[in-house]
Amino acid sequence: MDSKLAPIRKGLLEFLVLKIVGARSVYVPDILRTLAETQFATQEGTLYPLLSKLRREDLVQYEWRESGIGPPRKYYRLTGTGRAQLRALDDYWQGINRTIAAIGS
Amino acid sequence: MERISVTVRLNGRSVVQFDAAAYQRLEAYLAESESLLEGDPDPAEIMNDLEQAIADRCAQRLTPDRPVATLAELDAALDEIGTVQVADAAAASAGAAAATASPASTARPTAPGQPLRQHSQGAVVSGVCLGLARFVGLDAMWVRIVAVVLTLVTGGGAIVVYAALMLLLPFAPLEPGGPPVGWLPAKCRDAIEFLRSRLNGGTVTTS
């Protein structure tokens, strides 16, 4: 069963990361913590390549902030394009949900 | 006895001490990550982020009286960080192929009892012989030899059977990291899927 669900989670992870970054500016441990309690629990090994891709696609950007303890941290937030993309994904997702609820019932 | 430790600067700024075994493991993890990121347009940024994550997670586990990271600390940190998963689909297949390239991937011994399907990955023509081989648990080479002999013996009659199986057998889903799909198998798959969609389309419109 999980082999059927894993690709769905994988496909949705990008959407969820955009949602988290869209809510407030965050650094990677914040994202990991938010996802840890969900079905989408993930790891840096997955998240860093994904964030790097999102940055290349100009959907997120980051800035360095001093942290008081330890080295400065990368804080991510959405770009204008990212916000538009998130809205489009959100609409699409709502549409999919309506279709799933309506079909076969 | 003297414990030899290695001082490493990770991500150009965070200094961590590792013992010899942990240092070896660190090098192996970074080398593996780098090869997985082959094909990613910006591996340097991701490698820096990973190094920082390793440094941070090791630092959390070290204390002033235990300042050297051993395998215990490093393995726990690497477990939390996980193996690199490439985000780009195209880069993913390139990296996965590089990371899992094994010389015998198409001749991989298979357990019998897999459903009878065509396997495009590692196929010569359309993957019928490979599918039969997986179905009965033989090396594909033997099935192919039998198919060629049958073709010769039957004066080409076996080709008709092959074509019928091409049309009838479902295609196995493509496995990420599996052997590549050759030019001919890809063409066969496209052609058959096109034919099937036409056939299905016909029945749907008439019913």
Image (spheres, coloured by chain):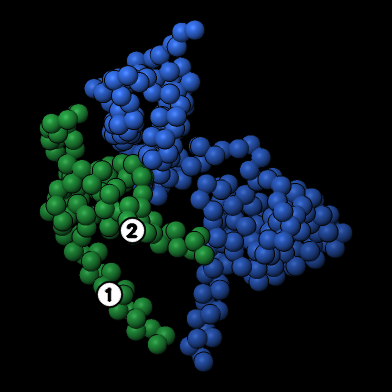
**Residue A28 % position (x, y):** 25, 43
Please state which amino acid type lies under the numbered disc 1. Gly
Neighbour tally class for label 2: few under 14, some 14-19, many 20 plus, Cα within 10 Å: few
Q: Secondary structure at mark 2?
A: loop
Location of mark 1 (residue): A95
Are dots 1 and 2 on a single chain?
Answer: yes
In whole angstroms, how far apart are the C-alphas of marks 1 and 2? 22 Å
Q: Nearer the viewer, residue B83 or B109?
A: B83
Location of mark 2 (residue): A38
What is the letter of the blue chain? B
Please state which amino acid type lies under the numbered disc 2. Thr
Query: From where the camera sits, is residue B96 visible?
Result: yes
Residue drawn at (54%, 39%) of the image = B100
> What's the colour of chain A in the image?
green
Q: Is residue A63 left or right of residue B183?
A: left
Return the chain for callout 2. A
Return the chain for callout 1. A
